[in-house]
């Protein structure tokens, strides 16, 4: 297992997201991952705006 994948998986696990062995095991996993990351980004941005 590469060092990149080990850290990638650790971070994905911390976010509660799947970390497939290949970059994206299939289109469904890719879409779900992108949606979850976009949602987290939106929530963080909204939180930042409220605290600024």
Image: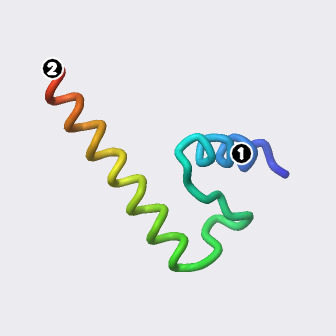
The residue most toward the front is 16
Disc on the earlier residue, 2 or 1 = 1
- Looking at the picture, tell me which residue is in the foreground, 24 or 29: 29
Q: Is residue 15 above or below residue 26?
A: above
Give the image's coloring scheme. rainbow
Q: Is residue 42 above or below residue 34?
A: above
Instruction: Where is residue 15? Give x, y as percent.
Output: 53, 44
Q: CA distance from mark 2 to mark 1?
A: 34 Å
Q: Is residue 14 above or below residue 49?
A: below
Instruction: Where is residue 20? Give x, y as percent.
Output: 68, 64
Quadrant in the picture for the C terminus: top left
Task: Identify the residue at horizontal 51%, vertical 70% (top origin).
Answer: 30
Helix or strand or loop: what does disc 2 sit on? loop
Q: Quadrant of residue 43?
A: top left
- Residue 26 got which mark? none
Helix or strand or loop: what does disc 1 sit on? helix
Q: Residues within 10 Å of mark 1 (few under 14, many from 20)?
A: few
Q: Quick check: 46 left or right of 18? A: left
Task: Identify the residue at horizontal 55%, vertical 54% (top origin).
Answer: 17
Q: Quick check: 1 left or right of 6? A: right
Task: Identify the residue at horizontal 45%, vertical 71% (top origin).
Answer: 31
The residue most toward the right is 1
Q: Nearer the viewer, mark 2 or mark 1?
A: 2
Q: What residue is disc 1 on?
A: 4
Q: What residue is disc 2 on?
A: 52
Task: Identify the residue at horizontal 61%, vertical 69% (top origin).
Answer: 24
Q: Quick check: 16 left or right of 4? A: left
Instruction: Where is residue 2? Give x, y as percent.
Output: 81, 49
């Amino acid at each position: 297992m590469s060092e990149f994948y080990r850290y990638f998986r650790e971070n994905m696990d911390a976010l509660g997201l799947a970390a497939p062995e290949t970059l994206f095991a299939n289109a469904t996993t890719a879409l779900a991952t992108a949606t979850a990351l976009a949602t987290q980004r939106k929530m963080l941005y909204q939180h930042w705006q409220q605290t600024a």
